[in-house]
Amino acid sequence: MRGHFKKRGEKWYFWAELEPGADGRRRQVSKGGFRTRKEAEKGFAEFRDQVRRGEYVAPSKLTVGFFLEEEWLPAIKASIRPGTHDHYSRMVGGYVVPRIGARRLSELTPSQLNSFYAGLLVDGRQQKSASKPAGLSPKTVRHVHTLLHKAFNDAVRWGSLQRNPADRAEPPRPRTPEMKVWDVTRLRIFLNQVADDRLGPIWLLIATTGMRRGEVVGLRWSDVDLDAGRISIVQTHVLVNRQVMVSEPKTLKGRRSIAVDASTVTALRQFRRLQLEERLRYGELWTDTGLVVTHEDGTAINPRLFSSWFAQHARAAGLPPIRLHDLRHSYATAALAAGIPAKVVSERLGHANTAITLDTYSHVLPNMQEKAAEQVAQLILGS
């Protein structure tokens, strides 16, 4: 490879002659800004080595938006969960493309990404209202950064980018919100409130197992062994473009078998009998989905509607408002406070590892430490 050097004003530049392109046309690359000819020669040598190693990516007119929407999202669709792909698509279309979609992918810099993140924090929300801030939360902006980092890593592997600009970008640090949970007294109040509800046994199931919403509404009777008192979680229901779709559990550990206590088993037997009575009553109008959680005609329940029903019951019971997912947190908090080993709680929740459980529920650990200190001391020292 030949190199030419020239001084323009106070700075030195080099020109490199590359092999002709596929169309036979001459290809020349230039780079400047060097203080001395020696620095320019060193820059040329580094560029030449980069080309020889096959690491050089020629500048292209490929835009960020085109790459994400037309190349990256279609390419990864088969390898990720439908809900995850839908989430990525909404972030790309809602946050990324409107702001930096027209920029050339090869020219995107870490500082431009930092400015993009700052803009999202101030005025990133698509649907603005007086009751909500115009900016996105640091956690959401961090999710956008994670998506871009993954996409640009793929662009590097596929030869569309020389290096990942997100490597050196600085997304905001997410604030850790205070976890909202119900203590065991409030859990009992809630369960008393829904005792006569048609789905009372299902609310009890969530409270005593910590199952995720999608795992509950996607549960099939074929995955429930009432005689053994066990439930196998092998599928989940998720919302994709407002449509309910069957998906796999969130993580590999999410595919699991959990024990169910005797009281919950009894309640599920009662619910099974009720569902069979409804099936006889509806006759040919019954829809056989095989699901545990259904409407009276056997059809599946939309996960969002299921959450709405939970909120209505919580208000009726006069309890502090929490999300349906926080019922899972309430179960985990109660289990750890009762002294159940973190590994067992982690396995029942379907966490990828115990560290996630300990980190998520660290607020319970101080009391557990005090309790452990007293119990061990009594064991060693006696009464």
Image (cartoon, rainbow, N blue to C red):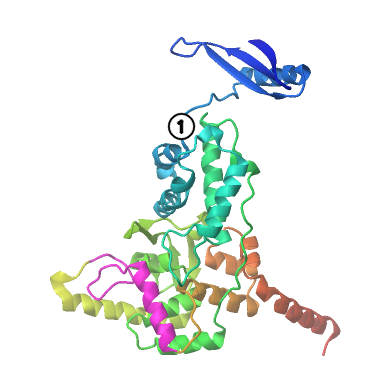
At a point 41% along the width and 41% down the height, the residue shown is 69
Residue 165 in percent (x, y) is at: 60, 39
Residue at 76% x, 17% y is: 37
Q: Quadrant of the C terminus?
A: bottom right
The location of residue 134, given as percent across then percent down, is 49, 63
The stretch in magenta equals: 288-317
| Amino acid marked by disc 1 | Leu
Residue found at the far right of this picture = 381
Kindly identify the residue that appears in the image at 25 percent across and 68 percent down: 299
Instruction: Judge from the rendering whether residue 64 lies leftward or rightward of residue 146; answer left or right.
Output: left
Quarter holding the N terminus? top right
- Residue 93 image position (x, y, % from top left): 41, 49
Q: Which of 115 and 182 is in front in this view?
A: 115
Q: Name the residue under label 1.
A: 62
Query: Is disc 1 surrounded by few (<14), some (14 to 19) or many (20+) residues within 10 Å?
Result: some
Q: Is residue 291 magenta?
A: yes
Which of these two is toward me, 141 or 341?
A: 141
In the depicted structure, whether residue 24 falls above or below residue 328: above
Instruction: Choose top left, top right, bottom left or bottom right for residue 6.
Output: top right
- Regarding mark 1 in the picture, which secondary structure is present there? loop
Q: Is residue 327 magenta?
A: no
Q: Residue furthest front?
A: 9
Residue 100 image position (x, y, % from top left)? 49, 44
Left or right side of 79 for 141 = right
Of 192 and 313, nearer the camera is: 313
Q: How many labels does the image show?
A: 1
In this view, 185 is above or below 166: below
